[in-house]
Image (cartoon, rainbow, N blue to C red):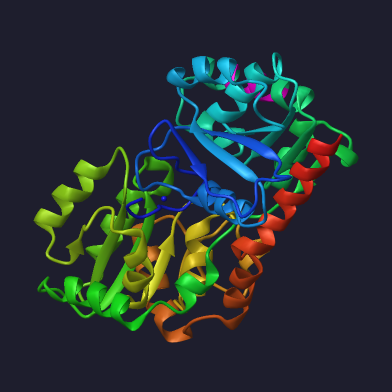
Amino acid sequence: MSNWCVSGSGVFHGSESTVPVVSTATAVRVLWLAPHTPDGISEGRSWIASALSARGLSVTQRTATPDAIGALFRNRNDYDVIVGTTRAGAGLGLLGSMFSEGAFVVDHVDPIEQFAATSPWWLAGTVDVVERLAFSRADHVIYHYDRERKRIDRSDSSVTKSRLAIQFDRFASPAETVIERARAHLDEFDTPDRRLVYVGGLEPIYRIETLLEATEKLTDWTLVVLGAGSLEDRVERAAERIDSVVFPGLVDNELLAGYLHACDVGISLVDDPHTLKVLEYGAAGLPVVQVDGRARATFEGQVTFCDPTPESVATAIRRATESGPSDELRKRAADHDIEAVASIYERVIRNCARS
């Protein structure tokens, strides 16, 4: 996801932060552990924590790093509920739950196959075992991916299906000054006026190479890349070599919606129906290009599908422009507003605290 959040699952700045609560008289005390991500990457969990604090819960957010282990054990009984977000947060939460009197909730946001695709087999296997242990020990598991339900292997009474969360109003109706600042920045580059935007991690799984190759086939388009990751150097080199590639990197969170409104099409080339970027594009009123695959069942008729080849991607971008934005996608994005999702987490956390 801060600087800008690149879509996904939780950023926690520094070692610990406590979200101010409306009233602490009867507040449920929550420790939320999440994996370490670079500043500006994936703020979904932070948004939910802020929404929960506004509802009277006392939420302390901590990055699941080795430094957090000592503090977790020293303060293990200071919390009514420990929430652990996969991957590292769930593992550390599992460890803490063995010595804590509080309830333990696993916030399962990423399928194991994504981790396995980019990690050594022995590490992926170890993480799989740890996560299954966390699922079995947890008082409750909140999950997002239907295909992970079998892996969780819990009774329906202790499992809740959730969904991704976005700040819908921020993306749908940013201040005009925000749009003007983003547009002015992009206008500094001497590039074609039609703009394709990618927001997200710069990792192989997101087919960044394919995206860059497709851009070279679109002589009348500019690719705007907003993100960070292991392929940053590759994108920087492309921006230096190709006049129509612009790489601002991570931009201020408040300005992100402005950049989307200053562009014409949003793109996602990961084979996944659960990506924040597609919802954010939809909320901003952009036509969307999405790689075909598992996402078709979710977004049929709402996005323009393509194969994961430069030629197909380039063709789909032109088709998306002709089709225009989807009202159905915008409505779907509104259903994922942060307040609706926070209600799911509040119900689970309060019930676990009571029991």
Query: Where residue 142 appears, x then y in whole percent?
Result: 72, 42
Nearest to the observer: residue 204 or residue 218: 204
In the rendered view, tell whether residue 332 sits above or below residue 17. below
Position of 216 relative to 355 (above/below)? below
For residue 50, above or below residue 190: above
Q: Quadrant of the C terminus?
A: top right
Judge by depth and name the residue closer to the eye, 318 or 40.
40
Please name the residue shown 45% across and 79% down the image: 173
User: What x and y, as percent, mark residue 6?
Assistant: 40, 52
Quadrant of the rendered structure where residue 141 is? Answer: top right
Q: Give the left or right position of residue 92, taking residue 163 as reference.
A: left
What stretch of residues is rendered in magenta? Answer: 126-132
* Quadrant hosting residue 150: top right
Residue 296 lies within the magenta run: no
Q: Residue at x 31, y 70 (%)?
A: 259
Hey, which quadrant is residue 243 in on the image?
bottom left
Residue name at image x 30 percent, y 37 percent? 230
x and y percentages locating residue 132 in the rendered image? 71, 23
